[in-house]
Amino acid sequence: MKNQKNVWKVLLLAFIVFILAACGGDGGSEESGGESGGSGDSGSQKITVFNRKVEISDQLAAMAKEYTEETGVEVEVLGTTGDDYLQQLQIRLNSNQGPSIFTLQNETEAEQLKSYAYDLSNEEYVKHIAPDMELKVDDKIVGVPYGVEGFGIVYNKDLVKPEDVTDYASFVSTLEKFKGEGINGFGLAQDAYFLIGHPSNYPFALQEDHFDFIDRLNAGEVTMAETPEFQEFGKFMEAIKANTPNPLSITYDKEVGDFASGKTAMIHQGNWAFGMLSEFEFDFEVGMMPFPLMGNDNLAVGVGNNWVINSKKEEGEIKAANDFLNWMSTSETGHRYIVEEFGFVPALTNIDAGELDPLSQAVLDASNSGETIPWAINYYPANIVPNDLTPLAQQFFSEDMTGEELIAGMDEAWKGAQ
């Protein structure tokens, strides 16, 4: 009997322990379930942003922190470790470790990685992108521009009136006039893009469809030498060579410095040049006008980088990435960072840019109105400007080479660069 009582005591104790353990387990399950439920909330979703433009790394991280504080969504900003951003991006994407949001520069890169580019065409915020500034592939909007930049002829308003430089004949007569007065009428600089990269954009950009023209050029169906815009470009280059100092001896600093001092009336530059110009003392107003190839009357405006969402991510992460780009594109905080912290000329028409320098204002006005020509340069073969066109331009300015020979050389350089 005593043994039976002992057995019942043991069983009762075991039962109590079981009940307590079960209760403890239930409590743990409820706590775990609460965490699991929270992971479905947008506030606990994390996104990563792989940024290409190192100049805004700190500012982008600060903006991400503010977004997290406002929404609860963690945003991790990843930086590039060198100049091989695209290669680093491809490695991440191919190993399924790609970021939620990444950067593409142009249509060529977008075409290359289009299987990873999420279609933004139906997103409300992309409607604010300035005309023709969105990144598109297969007629789908896949990228939101960082900001816009533009280039053309930067001129001294005390010396030059835009209405006097509207075509080849008036351009040449203006250069000859200044040469006779001991003033450099038009300045280029020795750097690859300032010497030939940006100027060579014009005959491509003035084609009816520069993408189609370049595709046909790649296929050998057309040549630059047989195309009127390039023929006239060769004449412009001859006029510059005959009437201005040799740009091979002109650094970017000297180009801008001579302009600031009044020694040069016009230079070929972009809105970025105002930063250096402001370091000099000058007492005249500056403006930017179109390079008048074939009577062109629009600035060349384009986008250096674009935000792209990784289409291979899960639906929740894609939504969180979209929410972030929407916030950056439409919120007061996002606008403040774009203009004040990043220092961009907005590529979105819903942003009040505030006070801009005159060159950036000219670019913004052109961008918002849609009165621009494209950066066809973004569709060039990779590295053709520094590796092929620059040595050719150096030869042109240092030897007895005609404009026709320069264009023929560009055709040969193009074939070799593909």
Image: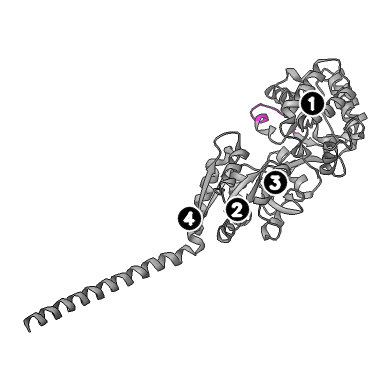
Alpha carbon of mark 4 to alpha carbon of mark 1: how far?
Answer: 50 Å
Dot 1, how many residues are within 10 Å of its Cα: few (below 14), some (14-19), or many (20+)?
A: many
Place of residue 225 in the rendered image (x, y in percent of width and height, measured from the top left): 90, 30
Q: Secondary structure at mark 2?
A: helix
Of badges 4 and 1, nearer the viewer stands: 4
Residue highlighted by disc 2: 328
Q: What secondary structure is marked by label 4?
A: helix
- Residue identified by numbered label 1: 265
Disc nearest the viewer among 3 and 4: 3
Would you say the magenta stretch is mainly helix, strand or loop? loop
Q: Which residues are magenta?
A: 276-285
Kindly report the distance in space between the C-alpha atoms of the residues bearing marks 2 and 3.
22 Å
Is tag 2's residue or tag 1's residue first in the polypeptide sequence? 1
Question: Which residue carries the number 4 mark?
Answer: 69
How far apart marks 3 and 1 lie (CA) works out to 39 Å
Residue 195 appears in the rendering: no
- Farthest-out residue, left: 2
Q: Which residue is mark 3?
A: 110
Q: Position of residue 380 (x, y in %)?
A: 76, 36
